[in-house]
Amino acid sequence: MADLDRVLVLAGGLSPEHEVSVHSGRSVSEALRRLDVEVQVADVDATLLDRLTADPPQVVFPVLHGSAGEDGTLREVLELVGLPYVGADPAACRLAYAKPTAKALMAARGVRVPRGVVLPKSAFHDLGAPALLERLADRLGPTLFVKPDRGGSAFGATPVTGVQDLSAALVSCFAYSDSALVEERVQGTELAVGVLDTGDGPTALPPVEIVPDGGVYDYAARYTAGRTEFFCPARLPEETLDRAREAALTAHRALGLRDLSRTDLIVTEGGEVVFLEANVAPGLTETSTFPMAAAAAGLDFAVVCRELAHRALLRG
Ligand SMILES: Nc1ncnc2c1ncn2[C@@H]1O[C@H](COP(=O)(O)OP(=O)(O)OP(=O)(O)O)[C@@H](O)[C@H]1O
Ligand SMILES: [Mg+2]
C-alpha cells in the first residue's frame, strides 16, 4: 500500500446541512487518526484555494452535504487544483444531485420511481397557484410528497395529505430550491442502502431499515437521538433485500458514482422497490446509516475510510 499520511477532510460548507457535515467530518477524521493517518480538517471558505495550493494534502476526503458539496461544484474545483479526492466526479454528482434526472435514469433501467411533476416557483406566479394545485392533485392523487428538486437532509420536504396543505408545502420547499418535485406519496418501509467500492468493484452493504417515531423521516427525526429506530438487518424478506441492494448498485452504476454512495428507497407493502434518490456524500456521523451498514457487514469504519482515501491516492 502506498503511504497515506496526509489527508484533508473537507467539512462544514454553507448549505443548511452544515452541522451534519461537521459531525461527518469529525467521524472521518477521528477514524483516520486512529489509524495514525495525519488528518487536517478544513471548511470551504475564501482561504481554501490558497491553502490547497500552498500546502497540498495527498488526498482530499470531502464530506460536504447539500449544494456545492454534492452538486459537483467542489469536486470541479478539486479537479482544477489537481488534487485527488474520495468520491464521485463532478459530472456524476450533477446527475445524482438533480433528483428528476436521477429518477429518469433509474426508470430507464426498469426501477420504479415515484410518479411526479417538476415545477419551478415561477410557474405558480405566472399561471396562478390555485389552478395548478388542483391539477397536481388530480394527476398525482391527494396524498403527495413535496420536496426540492435538489437538496438534502429532508429540508423543505413535506408529506401532504390533501390539496389544502399543498401550497404551504410548496412555500417551504421554495425556501430551499427554485424548483419543486411533487410526487405521489409512496407508503411502505424505508431503506437506505450504502454502496462501497474499495477497489474490487461496487458492493451493496446490508440495507438499513428506517423507522421514524412520527412516521416521517424529517430533519428532527434524523438528528435527534431516539427519534428514529434503525434495523440492520432490515426486517424484510431476504429476497426483497437482495432487490433493494440490486437497485442501489444500479443507481451507483447508472449515475457513474465512485467509491461510496447511499441510495434511499421505499419498499411497498407488495414488496416493490421504489427509488427515491442517491447521495454522493452520505452522512458519516456516528448515527448515520452508512457506518451502521458497514459495521453490519463486519467492516471497520476507520479501515473503510483509509481504503477510500488510499484508492483516491492511487487514482491521483
Ligand atoms: N415520494 C415520496 N413518498 C414518500 N416519502 C418520501 C417521498 N420522497 C421522499 N420521501 C421521504 O422524505 C425523505 C427525504 O427525501 P429524499 O431522500 O428524496 O430527500 P433528501 O432531503 O435529499 O434526503 P437526504 O438527506 O437523504 O439526502 C425520505 O427519506 C423519505 O422519508
Ligand atoms: Mg434521502
Image: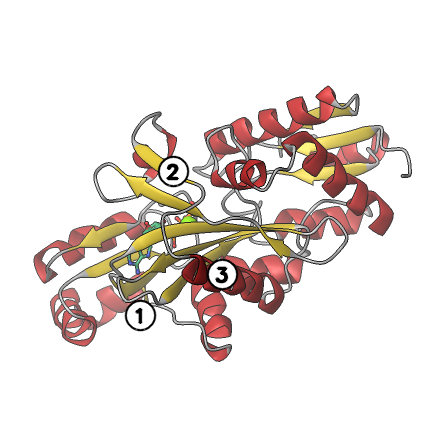
Q: How far apart are the two marked residues, 2 and 3, measured between alpha carbons?
A: 18 Å
Q: Give the mark nearer the N terminus: 1 vs 3.
A: 1
Query: x and y percent of residue 36 in the render?
Result: 79, 21
Which quarter of the image is occupied by the N terminus?
A: top right
Q: Which mark is residue 230?
A: 2
Identify residue type, mark 1. Gly
Q: Which mark is residue 116?
A: 1
Identify residue type, mark 3. Asp
Residue 307 shows up from this direction: yes
Q: Which residue is mark 3?
A: 242
Q: Residue furthest front?
A: 238
Q: Residues within 10 Å of mark 3 (few under 14, many from 20)?
A: some
Q: Is residue 174 above or below residue 98?
A: above
Q: Is residue 66 left or right of residue 119?
A: right
Foreground: disc 2 or disc 3:
3
Q: Are marks 1 and 2 in contact (CB under 8 Å)?
A: no
Foreground: disc 1 or disc 3:
3
Please report the residue visible at 49 percent of the width from the left and 66 percent of the height from the top: 102
Identify residue type, mark 2. Phe
Q: How far apart are the two marked residues, 1 and 2, measured between alpha carbons?
A: 28 Å
Judge: label 1 CB < 8 Å from ligand 1. yes
